[in-house]
Image (cartoon, rainbow, N blue to C red):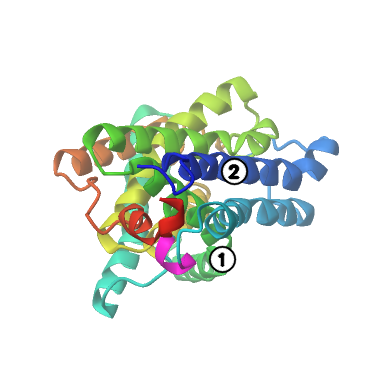
Amino acid sequence: MTTSMGVPASLPRRRGLLVFLGVAYVGMWVAMSPLLAGGFRRDDGRAETGGLEQVCIAAAMFAPALAAILVIRFVERAGRLRDVLALRWPASWGRAVRACSLGIAVPAGLTVIALFIGDAAGVYSWGEVHWSELGTWATGMLVQLLMSLPLFFGEELGWQGYLFPRLAQDGSPVRLRVAYLATGIAFALWHLPTLLMGGQYPGQPWYVSLPAMLVSCTLALPIFTWLRLRSGSVVPAVIGHAFVSTVSVSMVKEFAARDITLDPLHMGLFGWPGWIAMGAFVAFLALTGRLRVPPDLTNHSYSRKVPASTR
């Protein structure tokens, strides 16, 4: 199929993908440039994030959403943003509550499993649980999770709202494998500036942290995508991503013995114990057909919304 001017219909989509990746990646590097220029380096897994780091991270996290909006508005002209990016609630409030609850329960369960695996392997030690303080910690984490949601909308409107549906196309098995792998790799490589500064893997050189991030994102992305597919909305995926990056990380610290050195490469969801937990869950999702794309994925509505002059 070609446009009325003889331009192949795939060109706007390919151009959109290139523009999306360019804006998302450049936005990340620009946002991180003050920290990179200042020689910032994170070497301690228990270290708190400073004010400048928080500002730079927040700016970077909006880059994928900005990229998606620019492409949809000015490159692909694919329809209403909320429809194309699945920026909506699931069909009913009951379904919305269940979907959003899974965005919390599944990462929480996988994190606990990862910590038990680490403990059994001798790379993680449980500390003494102060039950009287656990409620206060959980309340604080819930508040932090809610406050961080706008930032993770900034990421997932790009990865789950835009990139994955474009790569999945007709939902054939081959296209799905390409979409899951390519989106996971793009998601991981986007973090390169923070990896260079020890962000996700404090104290590790980039040639260790980058492959680790590639494995972590390739395994985590299908879980976020499953949350998005089963609900028809990016909201549960946003909640799941926010939980993994905030509460899950805090769980590793909160439940650890005070005298152990925290090394995310060996602890939590983005360490090798987490790879085992996430890999098993992703395998379950794949074998039970839960990672297939339903007919109403935004990529299909995309093909209906492209103006006739561009088809």
- Tell me how far mark 2 sits from mark 1, CA to CA: 23 Å
Tell me if residue 128 comes above or below residue 90 in the rendering: above
The kind of residue on which mark 1 rests is Pro
What stretch of residues is rendered in magenta?
80-84
- Foreground: 236 or 140? 236
Farthest top residue in view = 207
Q: Quadrant of residue 104?
A: bottom left
Q: Which mark is residue 19?
A: 2
Q: Position of residue 35 (x, y in %)?
A: 79, 42
**Residue 53 horizontal/vertical position (percent):** 74, 50
Mark 1 highlights which residue?
150
- Seen from the viewer's position, the closer of residues 186 and 269 is 186
Residue at figure coordinates x 67%, y 56% from the top left: 58
Is residue 160 visible in the rendered image? The answer is: yes
Say whether residue 103 is magenta. Answer: no
Q: Residue at x 36, y 72 (%)?
A: 89
